[in-house]
Amino acid sequence: MTGLVLAVALGLGAYGVAVLEHWASTGRFRVAGPAISALALLGRESILPRKPDRLFFETAPVLLLVAAVLSLAVLPLAPGLIAADLATGALAFNAALAYVLVALIMAGWGPDGAYGMIGGWRFLGQLIAYAMLVVMPITAVAMRAESLSTVQIVASQEGLWNIAYQPLGFALFALAGMAMAFAPPFDLPTAAGDLAGGVEAEYTGVRRLVFRLGRMVLILSVASAMTVFYLGGWLGPWLPGWAWSAAKILAVASAMLLGGRMVPRLREAALLEWSWKLGIPLALANIFIVGLIVLVVPT
Amino acid sequence: MSAQLFFLAAFGLAAVWFGIVVFRTHSMVRSALALLFSQTAIGAMFLVMQAEFLGILQIMMMATEMSIMAIFMVMFMMDPGGLGEMDMKHQRKLSLGAGAVAFAGAVAVAFLAEWGRLPASIPGAAEQVRLLGLELLGRSMLIFESAGLTILTAMIAATAVAVQPPQVPDRPAGGPGAAGTHGHGGHGGHGAGGHDHSEHGDHAGQDHAGHDHSGHDHGGHDHAKHAHAKHDHEGRGQEKHQAHSGHEDHGGHEGHGEHGHAAHDQAGKDHGGQAADSDDHAGHDHSGHDHGGHDHDHGKDHGKDHGKDHRKDHGHGAERDRPAPAKAPPGQHRKGHEENGT
Amino acid sequence: MSELTQYAILFALAVGIVGLVLSLYALARAIGRNKPEPGKDVPATAGQLSRDPVWVRYHARYYGYALLFLAFDMEMAFMYPWAVVYRQEGLVALLDMGVFLAILFLGLLYGWSQGALRRQ
Amino acid sequence: MTMEGAREFTPLPIFGALRRLVAGALARDLRALVVPGPDVARALGLDLEAAGLIPAEGPRQASVLVVIAPLPGKLRDAASVAYAQMPRPRALLALGGNKLSPLPAPDISAEPTQAGLETAMRQLRALISHASFAERVSEYSAPTVQSRIVYTCPMHPEIVSDEPGNCPKCGMFLVPRETSAALQPPAHEHGTSSMAAAAIAPDAHDANPDHAHGSEANSYTCPMHPEVISDQPGNCPKCGMTLVPAGKDENHAGHGHDHSAHHHHDSQAGANSYTCPMHPEVTSDQPGNCPKCGMTLVPAGEGENHAGHGHDHSAHHHHDSQAGANSYTCPMHPEVISDQPGNCPKCGMTLVPVEEASTGGPGDHASQGGHDHAAMQEGEETGWLERIEPGFMSMVEMTQGAPRSSDGLQMEWITVPFGPFFPGLPGGLVVEFLLDGDTVVEARTTSLAGRGDLLAEGPMPAAGFVDMLGARMPLAPVSYRLLACRAIESAAGARPGAETEAARDAALARERAASHLLWLAQLGRQLGLPRIESRAAALHRTLRRADPQDLRAQIPAIRRLSRQLAAARLLTRRLRAVGDLPDPAAWTGPAGPDHSAAGRLAARLADMEQALEAAAAAPALAIPAVQEIGAASGHGHAMIETARGTAHLHVTLKAGRVSSARLQTPSAAHVALVGPLTAQHELADALVAVASLDLDPWEIDA
């Protein structure tokens, strides 16, 4: 039963994110927009490049979708509503999202096109920038919760949400999360302006549909991770647990998609320098501060 | 129990199969990602054996690290796309022998070693992480700290091998300095944790550092307009002239004058401060060489004695001169004002 | 529910998604057929045909960062179990990890001073 | 009602309804690739988003090709390539004329006005929802997309020939490679496609002499070192071989062929050149040791195929020291061993002699006594390698000739075109970057929108000339009409009235402001700022045909936009690092004290506001039209400040008709800045730098 509810929640969540993304990119809020473009993509030819690495070209979209869905599977919507409550859930979320990089390298290298290849290797540089800023804040969250299980992490935020408890960690995790979902301004691998679609340039038809579905679920997964780790998941006074989760996730997703378009696209060199020269020292400081607070403030 | 065994065998076979694909494929990226999925299969085996923390850790860390190995293999291996179908297997007999010996050793250890009793009950995943944490802070704190030291040495070694310290000291201040692109980087640094598979890379790096990479003599085809290594214009240093550090060999070719290389400033060439070059001419420090203006003659004379040094050092019959890299233009003081970012 | 069933659920989820994708592909194939035409399958570069393979030795400029990243990735592996037992162990855990992080921060500063943290 | 770009389907029972549903969705999700570019569509006052067309980044994401009709030939060819690469079902919408030769007949054609576009969209939706799937469709193939198989050597991409065979330089089998058939083989060998897998482009650049010199006749090259090129016959400075004429097109490779019979290092003349028997590519002028394996260098001149037989005179030559039959192996496939020379069966490379005791350990190395250790420090380095791994292709040897990147690594460079319909560049401009990873090494800019000389069809009447010049420059029609009027009037000596002059200046000022807004929209799209792009495009639409009162109403909104842009710290930080002009004198466009892209942005915003005030202050606005000049004749010159810089026009009149005209446009001058601006820059920065120049491809005639 929970499986069915989770499947429906996943579908609705992904569609909600798709509507937000459609609104952010085309400027018009049309609820039917994503459905129409999905059906249109289904109807278009799916062109196979001439001398591709066929294995890479085929597995990239599927791997992206599988990685996004698995990362969602360890995040709870409500106390009992979780696909797999692993004891190391926070780690599993990060492990699943590491394969987004593998999918994008495959998508970039597979079709043997210049734009895609450059986009793919650029995303590896982007990972080197954001990976540490995802993992270190999660460690600080686990320190407070004394466990890596996502349900425990949400339960530990009973009194005070982590956004208030460790705001620095939240800021770093938010930026790194947007970089992980390559949402603007971090859309280096699929940059419209300088790579004309980059890694997803060569995908048409149904393969492109699966690729974009993977992207939507990825944005949903990053948004729900931010909710679970920092915004107290299902905790909330009046509404039932799942309603709070859904509201927070959609709020975070719309903030990510609409806010991100205010800032010009970042250069990869600048992203790397900012994250290694400023981000990682801040993340280490965040761990240290949280360490002190955890010792001083008895729960 | 049988389902667990089945999945354990399935993932084991998958790991072995991906391991075989690593060596049978011609494309470098395919072999790197095959190794990646082989590690993932091993991570899945950990999960089947209910060692959740190790399994998830294996799956997570190997994905990023094997991708980094993939980019190093693509950078330093001959034909990364595998288009030339080149046979990459070297020393076939030696490696087959070594493989057989290793396999025999592993099987022997598996069967002969004393593994002790199978534990009655496996602690839960959360409990395992807690126990591991206590272990780190308790009995094996020394190992934990020495691991920190080994990682530190790995970082220092990797940086020393792969990265050439910049002439303009990189601004340690918070804001990122200018994205400068000069200095000569060595080849294929060794990834920490010694799992760098690009033995070609080491070889080339080793080869490169010690071996005089007898720069292919470019004398004949140097085009004024086709200067290969244009100067680095990343930073807006105050130099206004455009210095082409062409691959000009001044040693043996006096006849080059009439080729009409009009504005051919040798400053760039003299800056060939490559690792191989600099260790030969320890005293011959180019970096401080401030050319300021567009001084052609000075460069030319300097070029000559530079050329002569070469002949003395290498004692080769043929005139050898290394192609000048696109060195930082002379006296480039990059003001770090053009950092950019969020 | 025991951990093994959770792993089984994750594995089933992955296989289910692959099945969903394959059924989508079958549906698309039923709707229409692809027609091979000259020039259609060449990688598209904005209105020009670039037919030559681009699988060359790509010059990534971030190898300075990549090497330090490998070391930091190793370091993270130690920090997860430490984080779980941190509250229980108290000050000794803080000092212990403080030393560990200081050592590694030293490596970061060394890399920084040697110019690893820039676009090579 | 049939559609040219429909998609084939096999009729299945239950999927008919789903197909209709999908066709309906296709009709409502229209992704448009605008040819020549969204900036030209906006300049004509078309609002594609309002009409329901979502801009697509490339042909793969597009379902409708919107062609704004009067296109020069080269742009039509590029449009046919883009059309061929669009996935079916695809539609072709032509605005303003429908003879688009390589493209098929347009499905829908309409007037290039917003009303025309709206009606066309209704017809297009109906057509797609009914005819996007068909049982039978005809294949679209244009000459521009045909391909031809040529054969090239994986290791020496400059060797190209029409039939399979061996590479004259290393003997490897030539591998087939596709190249476009329509283009004349050699001249365009570089134009569109880079070399094969081992694409060490700079060598390829030099190797093809006629590319460098243009005229094929008088360039000489060395058969063994094609990168050696000189204008008169003589000896190759490297190996002393006599230089051969580079020859017309194919026979360069053909010429190489007759060498392939014997070992590629035969050197007919050059008595004084020495080479190493084991590493033929190592050559020098005087005797000594081979840097690679330390063997003494032998005179290269005397034998035809000296690789075959061992050398007699060098006593300690390690080949001769093994008695018995010396065996040969392939450098790349060591397991291929044969006892007589020839080609490796697996890759076709010429087999090189190998030492007998290759598998022996270091122990018996001394007994071989081949190398004297003292002199050759490097020899020792690779000597032991040769014994363990005969013919090991070390990367250092492979990258011998490759030029180094700025951090000293020798990587392979690829030539990537950022073509006429690139979302980050003005429509019609092609920038071909030679990329080292994602850093630009060399940039070559051409414009496919140029239309050749002005008076192609002979002398024109004055009014016709003004209209022609206005129509030729869609991005700045008013400026060039005014330029033509002033030039003709100065030639005819007529002086227009004061208020027509003021009205004309006001129209010019309005167009300057509109052109800057157009540039802002283009920059917003490239940097990923969709809000800036949509606001700038909306302001441009209202401004384009506004009279002074509307202009005055627009000023506050435009001032708000420019203040917001000036205050955007992240945008200015990003632009300050980019597009620094090496010599500001060459830049005639709006410029402030700061010569970076941020400086030009600030200058354009200031210029826009100032132009708006001037246009709003004028009593009336009038599109420049030429006065009645009767049958005057004479020579005239005019110069005006367009939004992109100063444009000059020299005109000679003969009896009221324009007999000769010479136009100098700012963009034609600024194109030369692209090279130094983008060298050694990251790709994204290079494209922003090119965008900051605000080049108008229609003004560039290359």
Image (cartoon, coloured by chain):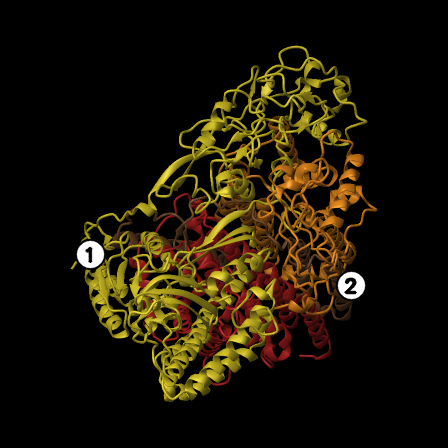
How far across and down, in percent of the image, does residue B210 sit?
74, 38
Which amino acid lies under the numbered mark 2 shown in the image of this protein?
Val
Residue at the extreme right: B283
Task: Determine the residue located farthest toward the left in the rendered image.
Answer: D1
Mark 1 falls on what kind of element? loop
Question: Left or right: where does residue B60 sit relative to residue B257?
Answer: left
Residue under numbered circle 1: D14
Determine whether, in the image, residue A201 is placed left or right of residue D688.
Answer: left
Residue type, numbered disc 1? Ile
For the residues beneath circles 2 and 1, the answer to whether they share a chain is no
Q: Say whether residue B138 is visible.
A: yes
**Disc 2 designates what residue?**
C99
Chain of residue at mark 1: D
- At 60% from the left and 28% from the top, the residue drawn is B92
Q: Which chain is brown?
A: C
Chain D: its colour in the image is yellow
What is the distance, in whole Å, between disc 2 and disc 1 at their CAs?
69 Å
Label drawn at residue D370: none
* Front residue of B91 and B228: B228
Q: Tell me which chain appears red.
A: A
Element carrying mark 2: helix
Q: Residue at x 64, y 32 (%)?
A: D237
Subunit ID for the residue under disc 2: C
Q: Position of residue A154 (x, y in %)?
A: 56, 73
The spot of residue D528 in percent (x, y) is 48, 68
Q: Is residue A179 left or right of residue B167?
A: left
Which quarter of the rendered picture does the C terminus of chain D lie within?
bottom left
Above or below D391: residue B80: below
Q: Are marks 2 and 1 in contact (CB under 8 Å)?
A: no
User: Which colour is chain B painted?
Assistant: orange
Work out whether residue A220 can be spotted.
no
Q: Nearer the viewer, residue A238 or C68?
A: C68
